Amino acid sequence: MKTQIAILKLEQWKFKTEKGQELEGSSAFFLLEDFDLQRTTVKNEILTAIQKSKLPAIFEVDLKPIQKYNNGKAQLKYELNSVKFLNEIKVF
């Protein structure tokens, strides 16, 4: 689904699984058109494209909806399949 989103910030994360495996990555926090705040893991060329931009910024993206389950409850989340920088957001 092609749409525009506002990516607010990138955040690095690191944690250890129950089996002792250490995982790390980057998450993008973004707003959808209805101001629904979302977070998704980003990597490779998508991460590079976001890092090159001054955040917060508006991007044209291809979103892929996915269902995530947490404690038996389903939630609709999104993955970023492509990003294209459109415009920087001036906060102040």
Image: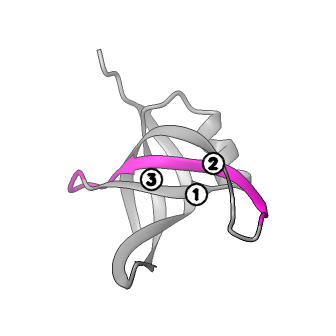
Asked whether the residues under the numbered discs 3 and 2 touch, taking CB atoms below 8 Å apart as contact, a structural biologist would say: no
Q: Residue at x 51, y 48 (%)?
A: 28
Which mark sits nearer the N-terminus, 3 or 1?
A: 1
Give the main secondary structure, helix, strand or loop, of the magenta stretch.
Answer: strand
Residue matched to label 3: 60
Residue 1 visible here: no
Pointer 1 or 2: first along the chain: 2
Label 3 or label 1, whichever lies nearer to me, is 1
- The percent position of residue 66, horizontal first and vertical second, equals 45, 78
Residue matched to label 2 = 26
Determine the secondary structure under disc 3. Answer: strand
Residue at 48% in and 31% down: 55
Identity of the residue furthest to the bottom in this view: 72
Disc 2 element: strand
Q: Is residue 85 left or right of residue 13?
A: left
The reply to whether discs 1 and 2 touch (Cβ–Cβ < 8 Å) is yes
Residue 32: x and y in percent read: 31, 55
Q: Amino acid at mark 1?
A: Thr
Where 87 falls versus 14 (above or below)? above
For image coordinates 53% across by 27% down, the residue present is 54
How far across and down, in percent of the image, does residue 92 sit?
29, 14
For marks 3 and 2, give the CA distance: 20 Å
In this picture, is 10 found above or below 70?
Answer: above
Q: Which residues are magenta?
A: 20-35
Query: Sequence order check: which comes first, mark 3 or mark 2?
Result: 2
Quadrant (top left/top right/bottom left/bottom right) for the N terminus = bottom left
Q: Secondary structure at mark 1?
A: strand
Q: Is residue 92 magenta?
A: no
